[in-house]
Image (tube, coloured by chain):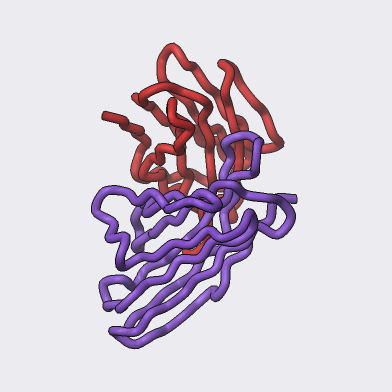
Chain colours: A purple, B red
């Protein structure tokens, strides 16, 4: 159990367009989901924490108007990169924490975003 | 501030044993995770320690000393597929995961 999916796995978009990435917990309910970004050869960088039904909490330096996060249900969170630029090209990974359980985060497979 | 230290890179030989250390200084402690991450993939769970001592799981073992703020991941009978980054993460007093920068492990034949 504890499977997290992400869609799409890869996306290429043009500069100035918006891209939506979905994160789903397939076999459990996740009250909290996390969005990370990882640049090549660097560690995970937490972008924001989203709780179902409330506004996301963004880490310092992450623009909330550029990275829109919606956690509308206990199994789905979305990250929308608005007006994407080449510097937004990165590996975006979501994780989910099981409702009422331990603190382990179950990771999705990641989304490779390339902005041209 | 909160800080997690682990070596940037380690090299080991196939079939050998390697120990990856992690030291931490965090506001509170509610457990420590080790994750494995292959290049281009998301992290996968390896172990979770919240009490002092050694947890063994197959070829992988994880040790924790809360008084020393120290953990290590021990990999035995190394295989080429163990080449990956190993991430140490601590759950702090706010139940947030604080991530180390990861240790890139290179396995040589």
Is A21 located above or below residue B89 in the figure? below
- For the question of whether residue B83 can be seen, the reply is no
Left or right, residue A58 beside residue B52: left
Considering depth in this image, is A72 or A100 the residue closer to the camera?
A72
Is A58 located above or below residue A19 in the figure? above
Q: In the picture, residue B46 is in which quadrant?
A: top right
Q: Quadrant of the C terminus of chain A?
A: bottom left
Tell me residue B30's x, y (percent). Answer: 51, 25
Residue furthest to the front in view is A53
Q: Residue at x 51, y 45 (%)?
A: B13
Residue furthest to the top in view is B67
Q: In the picture, residue A92 is in which quadrant?
A: bottom left
Considering depth in this image, is B49 or B95 the residue closer to the camera?
B95
Q: Residue at x 44, y 12 (%)?
A: B67
Q: Residue at x 36, y 24 (%)?
A: B27
Considering depth in this image, is A27 or B62 the residue closer to the camera?
A27
Count of numbered badges drawn on the protein: 0
Tell me residue B104's x, y (percent). Answer: 42, 49
Is A17 located above or below residue A24 in the figure? below
Tell me residue A95's x, y (percent). Answer: 54, 53
Left or right, residue A112 beside residue B5: right
Considering depth in this image, is B33 or A95 the residue closer to the camera?
A95
- For the question of whether residue A80 can be seen, the reply is yes
Tell me residue B8's x, y (percent). Answer: 34, 44
Q: Residue at x 39, y 65 (%)?
A: A68
């Amino acid at each position: 159990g504890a499977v997290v999916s992400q869609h799409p796995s890869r996306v290429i978009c043009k500069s100035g367009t918006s891209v939506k990435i979905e994160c789903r917990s397939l076999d459990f309910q996740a009250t909290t989901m996390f969005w990370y970004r990882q640049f090549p050869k660097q560690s995970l960088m937490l972008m924001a924490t989203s709780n179902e039904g409330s506004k996301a909490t963004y880490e310092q330096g992450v623009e909330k108007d550029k990275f829109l996060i919606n956690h509308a249900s206990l199994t789905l969170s979305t990250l929308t990169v608005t007006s994407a630029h080449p510097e937004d090209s990165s590996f975006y990974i979501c994780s989910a924490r099981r409702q009422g359980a331990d603190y382990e985060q179950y990771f999705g497979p990641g989304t490779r975003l390339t902005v041209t | 501030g909160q800080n997690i230290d682990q070596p940037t890179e380690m090299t080991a030989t196939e079939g050998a044993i390697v120990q990856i250390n992690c030291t931490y200084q965090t506001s509170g402690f509610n457990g420590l995770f080790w994750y494995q991450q292959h290049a281009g993939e998301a992290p996968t769970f390896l172990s979770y320690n919240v009490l002092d001592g050694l947890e063994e799981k197959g070829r992988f073992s994880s040790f924790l000393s809360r008084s020393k703020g120290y953990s290590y991941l021990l990999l035995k009978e190394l295989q080429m597929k163990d080449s990956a980054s190993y991430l140490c993460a601590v759950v702090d007093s706010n139940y947030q995961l604080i991530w180390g920068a990861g240790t890139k492990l290179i396995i040589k034949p």
